[in-house]
Amino acid sequence: MAVVPRLHLEDPPLRAAVTVSLDAARSHYLSRVLRLAAGDAVALFNAEDGEWRARVVALDRRGVRLAVEDRLRPPCAEPGPSLWFAPPRRTRLEWLVEKAVELGVGGFRPVITERTVARLQRPERLRAIAVEAAEQCGRLTVPEFAPTRPLARALVEEAPAALLFADEAGDGRPLLKALDGEGPEPVFLVGPEGGFTPAERAMLRARTTVRPVSLGPRILRSETAALYMLACWGAVRGAGG
């Protein structure tokens, strides 16, 4: 059975009998890369309308046009952890975004710490990576990127009810035990490549809603730590569901 390609599409709203004209990039992808022909099926989705079956009705110089037929899945909530992270360097950041979406992240919050060496650049590129990952893994939602803020400011302005931070000091509670009993949407925090400074660690530990957690005996790269936390959350959620 052939795999039906999925495309995230927000405009126009997805409804039965609607005809959708794709932009140049997606027309090229369907016609030149996947070599679809008239009558072939495509799945269209977004968070508000759910997922719909559509069929190719035209491929020409003006692009690809699809006719929306019927709904495959209604819209539904896809709760997941918010990931606070000090951006790693570009290649590692792009890999982190792709895999975090696949693992069910609910949203991204870039934060600036004292040892942050990279800045969040090309947000449109990261958004495109998140969209492609959602298309590949079967999600209906695409996690959003919140504006970059200094860590101390984000803590004050957003005041998460329960923030689990990966403390490389190693004396925090084991992550799996810390996740037991947490709500469906915890907040995770991973630091920069050089780790948190002693002052930052003290600031975090001084907040009653912040819990240091241990990720085991090895020192993980920041992007590995983030994905480890998401994978553990997925394991706990699966075991509890």
Image (cartoon, rainbow, N blue to C red):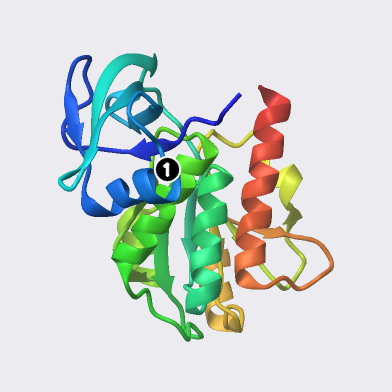
Looking at the image, which residue is at 50% across and 39% down? Answer: 80
> Farthest residue toward the right?
217
Q: Which of 25 and 234 is in front in this view?
A: 25
Q: Which amino acid does label 1 sit on?
A: Arg
Looking at the image, which residue is at 38% across and 62% down? Answer: 126
Looking at the image, which residue is at 41% across and 69% down? Answer: 111
Q: Which of 193 and 19 is in front in this view?
A: 19
Quickly name the residue at label 1: 35
Which quarter of the rendering shows the N terminus?
A: top right
Q: Where is residue 68 in the image (x, y as percent from the top left)?
A: 26, 21
Using the rendered image of the protein, determine whether residue 65 is visible from the camera's viewpoint.
yes
Left of 32 or right of it: where is 67? left
Left of 16 or right of it: where is 155? right
Looking at the image, which residue is at 74% across and 54% down? Answer: 173
Which quarter of the rendering shows the C terminus?
A: top right
Q: Which of 215 and 133 is in front in this view?
A: 133
Using the rendered image of the protein, determine whether residue 180 is visible from the camera's viewpoint.
no
- Graded by Cα atoms within 10 Å as few (under 14), some (14 to 19) or many (20 or more), the crowding at tag 1 reads few
Q: Position of residue 63 (x, y in %)?
A: 21, 44
Residue 115 against residue 96 in the figure, above or below: below
Is disc 1 placed on a helix, strand or loop? loop
Q: Where is residue 78 in the image (x, y as percent from the top left)?
A: 45, 31
Q: Where is residue 109 in the image (x, y as percent from the top left)?
A: 40, 59
